[in-house]
Image: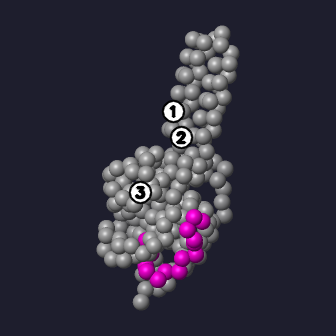
Amino acid sequence: MTIHKEGYTTIAISLLFIFVLNAIIDYRFADITWLRWLAYILSFALFITVLQFFRNPSRTFTSGNDLVICPADGKVVVIEETNENEYFKDKRLQVSIFMSPVNVHINRNPISGIVKFFKYHPGKYLAAWNPKSSTENERTTVVVAHENGTEVLFRQIAGALARRIVWYVKEGDQVEQAKEFGFIKFGSRVDIFLPVGTKINLELNQVVKGGITVLAELTKPA
């Protein structure tokens, strides 16, 4: 397991904060042993927590030209037909994966293909389970066209804790299934929109892993 590049700055700031805090406590409360040890323990816990936010575990990824792979770690919180009004402007099958603070926060391409559309939306930081978060929170929208013509839309959505979305793709890019397309710091949600009638291989509340769990099976457009 390694540490993701998005964590370098945050980890450095955390280390500086811990060093300064402990130096102050050691200087001001040198004679209060229990307080100093409490500070050491809490500092260690904080550092380990920050490290796990940015972990990048080694994985053997699933691949398949007709498969849609989960773009994120987390729990499936939505499987439903809904209107997608930004790009498709019609009814689609939506699958949403909630990323808690303890999940790996890397986002991966669910399919291979060409990026046909990308847009970043600044916005609010409503809780990720709020239905309005899909349209009102800070978010990105990516549409990738599969070689068979199917277009898949996936959306990074910030939440109450997640205050920075990072992306690595732009329109016209050729992307590869399971490769990184972005990162959401401290968790939140990823939505994916598929053609109605797509075979979904997940169930509500199922725990999934990005780049590994098969989300759906693609069919060639009629």
Q: Dot 2: within a 10 Å radius of its alpha carbon, few (fewer than 14), some, or many (20 or more) residues? A: few
Q: Residue at x 33, y 56 (%)?
A: 136
Image quadrant holding the C terminus, namely bottom left
Residue range highlighted in magenta = 193-206
- Res 214 quadrant in image: bottom right
* Badge 3 vs badge 1, beta-carbon distance below 8 Å: no
* Measured Cα–Cα span from mark 2 to mark 3: 31 Å
The vertical placement of 162 against 86, above or below, is above
Q: Position of residue 4 (x, y in %)?
A: 56, 48
Per the picture, the main secondary structure of the magenta-coloured stretch is loop
Looking at the image, which is closer to me, 124 or 59? 124
* Residue placed under numbered mark 3 in the picture: 130
Disc on res. 13: 1
The vertical placement of 148 against 56, above or below, is below
* Residue placed under numbered mark 2 in the picture: 8
* Measured Cα–Cα span from mark 2 to mark 1: 9 Å
- Res 140 quadrant in image: bottom left
Q: Dot 3: within a 10 Å radius of its alpha carbon, few (fewer than 14), some, or many (20 or more) residues? A: few
Identify the amino acid type marked 1.
Ile
Looking at the image, which is closer to me, 171 or 185? 185
Q: Position of residue 142 (x, y in %)?
A: 40, 65
SS type, badge 1: helix
